[in-house]
């Protein structure tokens, strides 16, 4: 059945045909719920009309959907609508391996890198008892970043009759149904002999196919050829491959591996792809069959082949060995993928989440398991040892000592919420012990200098600290650095000590992300280098790496002596992951090993946030608006509109009835902070804003219909957010950060001076409907707590829920909702006299929630959520000899 563009299949809108084959037609489609593109594979009519075969397909697809591997294209689900049965698959960009081979043989090192990733996918599937059965170049995609994805895992079995049948036509790739649908002859060329005979198959059949695919990558020719399918099958059953076609530079161990994979007798064939490159190592070892002189001398090729060979044998272990800095500067860059430890994902919020030692031998990153806090991991790339650092729960921002023997990191900090126990720690790779270096209020990166001190960005308001690496009080002589001479402090973050006198960093500025700057430690002079940069790093070969807000990595040659760029920035990579506040998952060793992640990182995938409505049981209905980097949604008093800021500096009004949105004209300002609040009559909103030339943030109000300019309520100064409008419409409650944190009460018409009503570290205030009681989160030495207090701050504070944040009053004033450990709590509160709360009631758990507001109707909540698969980074990209590639793209010394 052919589907035309615009056809809807459940929530999916067909965009166009991608291809067709024996296993059905494949379409590009748009997922209307998660706002992403997917591939839709419509099943052949012969399958969809056969109840027994369809039931088998359903069972097999459930097994296949459980595969979760960076080199296996995912199955998202099964969809049925209007008599059409289809698979919903991950849409993988890039060309197929068949298309790549059509351009000619693939160089040996590149072919082995691709083979490594294919083998990783097969080994993972085999471990779960799943056999591919139809591995061929057309079922392998290579993304523009060089990541390999194997397609159609096990679908041949799912779409065929019983594979144990002795009838040759029932072989999974040559079923009668598939032949009638037009199976290409190429499928037969990769079938194992037992598969061609229609006998039962196991993972050794995939080993044969793997060998046939690797042979074709190296030679540009199919291993078994013929004019007809029968001729090809005859060659598979009786003829030997033409080994003379292999390129002369093919290592002897690789030739032996191909022979072991292409053994006709499955009992003599290599049994497991996990053992594949043990064969290569054995062939290269001293003994009766030494490697050829060329293989011994060919350093770039031999090193790459050996490293990737070990990767096939040990996966994660060997992929890390690629980083060992043994290759010469002239060697070819080698790209590979390093999977994270099983069951973990990269995580982080407001600091870089990975680092590499100067010598390129060690890698540090922060990863978490589902439901747990992030831990620091250390990988020794030279030995393959990987270990989790004890006492590193809630780790952030690792950085290495110059000799690579220590790893510094922060704990108990997260986007300005240090819970009173934030600290810089250091971990010894030699002893396995962790020590506290200094206490800090917050953390925005650090760098360990050759002089034995650590430069730390301890918060967004306190400049930089210089901390002795052996512990002690911080030297805050860098703390009073001014940005362009202005009196207000500006955020200085992600520092990198590039010489004794120079620190590279990023600064907050008048553009959304500020830019890269250079700090002279002696003169405390701050020089701007490049605008609109969220993250910057200096490389030992003389380049500046500059990450733009759209996560594009730029590079420019940099003259260290003259402190200036000597060439324009050029684009190097796209989609570099960030860990929040623009801190990128990117690091480079002095020897030219690059490690980075792509996509979003758990905790910072804000661009994928979606608006929704949640009921009292936790069920979420997404609203029909595109995903964006939303702050906290706030419903209008009549419940017909939502006001929400986005992190590009905009304020939006969403009309829930007409399902449209409009942006308020901010007259040259950009919004700051996560919140916007409505006036009691719904005619206006208030928000934080900054303007070019202003020192600090102001609080503004503006008509909700956009009919007038912003009016300043609170003059520019310390960082502050409006949180609640008093019921009489005359005042605003706002939180203030900086050196005098607390809550303030500001007169909307400025007829009365702004006054402080609560002192201390507070956030998330909400007023009771009668305007008498203020619920807010307060931090003491034991952490954050939701409390209730009088509007004038007269106290005493009454604790609503220990360890809870983000309190919100219900519209009837009977309850306060608050958030603790991914769980929404409801606290009954009596306000007759002094507030008297009852024990908190847990309503539900919602780990995807990123912000919420109580609906005025009292029946539910408006929420910001992240899709379940947002921010899931389970692998790192590794490039050795990267400076060769960097110099080609961005030559040094240009003016």
Image (spheres, grey):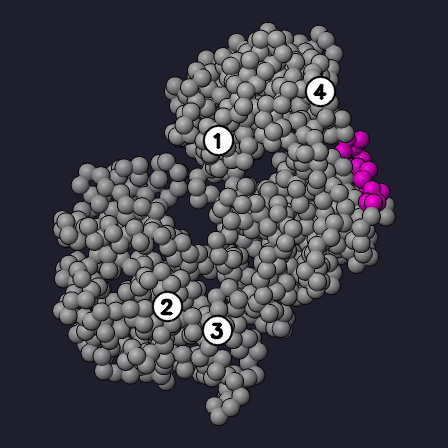
Q: Residue furthest front?
A: 839
- Residue beneath disc 3: 309
564, 179: nearer the viewer: 179
Task: Tell me the SS state at disc 2.
Answer: helix
- Residue beneath disc 4: 758
Q: Name the residue at 86% across, 48% down.
A: 522
Q: Quadrant of the C terminus?
A: bottom right
- Magenta span covers which residues? 473-490
The image shows residue 351, relative to residue 826, as above or below, that is: below
Residue 736 lies, in percent from the top left, at: 69, 25
Task: Tell me the SS state at disc 1.
Answer: strand
Task: Tell me the SS state at disc 4.
Answer: strand
Residue 163 lies, in percent from the top left, at: 20, 64
Rounded to the nearest angstrom, the CA distance separating label 2 from label 1 is: 45 Å
Residue 836 lies, in percent from the top left, at: 59, 15
- Residue beneath disc 2: 101
Q: Is residue 398 left or right of residue 267?
A: right
839, 709: nearer the viewer: 839
Q: Is residue 363 left or right of residue 149?
A: right
Few, some or many residues within 10 Å of mark 4 (<14, 14–19, 20+): many
Q: How many marks?
A: 4
Q: Name the residue at 32% across, 68% down.
A: 203
- Residue beneath disc 1: 864
Q: Is residue 752 left or right of residue 602?
A: right
Q: Name the residue at 63% across, 28% down.
A: 785
The image shows residue 76, relative to residue 141, as above or below, that is: above
Few, some or many residues within 10 Å of mark 1 (<14, 14–19, 20+): many
The image shows residue 244, relative to residue 417, as above or below, that is: below
**In terms of sequence position, does the residue under pointer 1 or pointer 3 come before the other?**
3
């Amino acid at each position: 059945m052919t589907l035309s563009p615009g056809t809807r299949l459940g929530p999916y809108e067909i965009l166009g045909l991608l291809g067709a084959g024996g296993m059905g037609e494949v379409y590009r489609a748009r997922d209307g719920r998660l706002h992403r593109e997917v591939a839709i594979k419509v099943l052949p009519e012969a399958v969809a009309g056969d109840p027994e075969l369809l039931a088998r397909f359903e069972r097999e697809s459930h097994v296949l959907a459980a595969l979760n591997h960076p080199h296996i294209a995912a199955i998202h689900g099964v969809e049925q609508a209007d008599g059409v049965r289809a698979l919903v698959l991950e849409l993988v960009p890039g060309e197929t391996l068949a298309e790549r081979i059509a351009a000619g043989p693939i160089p040996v090192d590149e072919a082995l890198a691709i083979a490594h990733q294919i083998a990783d996918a097969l080994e993972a599937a085999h471990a779960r008892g799943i056999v591919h059965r139809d591995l061929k170049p057309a079922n392998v995609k290579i993304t523009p970043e060089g990541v390999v994805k194997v397609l159609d895992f096990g679908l041949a079995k799912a779409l065929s009759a019983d594979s144990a049948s002795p009838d040759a036509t029932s072989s999974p790739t040559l079923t009668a149904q598939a032949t009638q649908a037009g199976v290409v002859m190429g499928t037969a060329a990769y079938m194992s002999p037992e598969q061609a005979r229609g006998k039962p198959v196991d993972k050794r059949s995939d080993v044969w196919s793997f060998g046939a695919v690797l042979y074709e990558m190296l030679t540009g020719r199919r291993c078994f050829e013929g004019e007809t399918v029968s001729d090809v099958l005859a060659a598979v059953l009786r003829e030997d491959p033409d080994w003379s076609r292999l390129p002369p530079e093919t290592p002897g161990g690789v030739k032996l591996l191909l022979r072991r994979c292409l053994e006709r007798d499955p009992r003599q064939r290599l049994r497991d792809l996990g053992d594949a490159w043990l064969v290569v190592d054995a062939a290269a070892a001293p003994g009766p069959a030494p490697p050829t002189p060329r293989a011994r001398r060919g350093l770039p090729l031999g090193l790459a082949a050996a490293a990737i060979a070990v990767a096939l044998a040990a996966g994660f272990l060997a992929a890390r060995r690629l980083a060992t800095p043994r290759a010469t500067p002239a060697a070819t860059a080698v790209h590979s993928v390093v999977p994270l430890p099983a069951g973990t994902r990269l995580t982080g919020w407001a600091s870089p989440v990975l680092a590499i030692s100067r010598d390129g031998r060690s890698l540090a990153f922060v990863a978490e398991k589902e439901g747990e806090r992030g831990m620091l991991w250390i990988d020794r790339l030279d030995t393959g040892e990987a270990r989790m650092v004890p006492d590193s729960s809630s780790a952030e921002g690792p950085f290495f000592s110059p000799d690579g023997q220590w790893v510094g990191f922060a704990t108990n900090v997260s986007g300005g919420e240090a819970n009173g126990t934030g600290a810089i720690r250091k971990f010894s790779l030699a002893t396995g012990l962790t020590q506290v270096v200094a206490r800090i209020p917050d953390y925005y990166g650090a760098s360990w200098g050759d002089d034995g001190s650590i430069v730390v960005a301890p918060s967004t308001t306190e400049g930089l600290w210089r901390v002795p690496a052996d512990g002690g009080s911080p030297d805050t002589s860098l703390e009073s650095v001014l940005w362009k001479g202005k009196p207000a402090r500006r955020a200085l973050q992600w520092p990198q000590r590039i010489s004794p006198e120079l620190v590279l960093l990023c600064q907050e500025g008048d553009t959304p992300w500020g830019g890269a700057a250079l700090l002279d430690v002696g003169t405390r002079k701050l020089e701007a280098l490049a605008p609109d940069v969220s993250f910057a790093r200096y490389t030992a070969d003389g380049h500046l790496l500059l990450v733009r807000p759209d996560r594009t990595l730029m590079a420019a040659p940099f003259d260290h002596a003259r402190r200036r760029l000597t060439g324009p920035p050029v684009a190097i990579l796209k989609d570099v992951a960030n860990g929040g506040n623009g801190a990128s998952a990117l690091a480079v060793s002095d020897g030219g090993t690059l490690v980075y992640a792509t996509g979003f990182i758990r905790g910072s995938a804000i661009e994928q946030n979606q608006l929704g409505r949640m009921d009292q049981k936790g069920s979420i209905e997404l609203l029909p608006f595109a995903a964006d980097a939303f702050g906290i949604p706030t419903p209008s008093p009549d419940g017909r509109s939502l006001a929400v800021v986005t992190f590009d500096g905009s304020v939006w009004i969403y009309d829930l009835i007409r399902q449209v949105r409009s942006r308020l004209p901010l007259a040259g300002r950009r919004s700051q902070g996560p919140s916007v609040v409505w006036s009691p009559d719904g005619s206006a909103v208030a928000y934080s804003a900054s303007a070019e030339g202003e020192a600090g943030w102001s609080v503004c109000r503006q008509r909700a219909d956009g009919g007038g300019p912003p009016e300043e309520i609170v003059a520019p100064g310390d960082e502050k957010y409006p949180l609640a409008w008093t019921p009489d419409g005359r005042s605003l409650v706002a939180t203030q950060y900086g050196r005098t944190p607390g809550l303030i009460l500001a007169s909307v018409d400025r007829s009365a001076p702004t006054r402080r009503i609560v002192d201390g570290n507070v956030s998330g205030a909400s007023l009771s409907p009668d305007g008498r009681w203020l619920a807010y989160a307060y931090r003491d030495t034991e952490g954050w707590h939701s409390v209730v207090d009088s509007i004038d701050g007269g106290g005493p504070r009454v604790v609503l829920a220990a360890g809870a944040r983000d309190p919100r009053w219900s519209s009837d004033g009977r309850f306060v909702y608050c958030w603790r450990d991914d769980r929404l709590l409801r606290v009954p509160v009596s306000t007759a006299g002094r507030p008297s709360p009852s024990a908190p009631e847990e309503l539900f758990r919602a780990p995807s929630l990123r912000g919420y507001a109580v609906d005025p109707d009292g029946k539910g909540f408006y929420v910001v959520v992240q899709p379940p698969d947002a921010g899931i980074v389970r692998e790192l990209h590794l490039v050795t000899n990267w400076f060769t590639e960097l110099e080609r793209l961005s030559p040094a010394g240009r003016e």
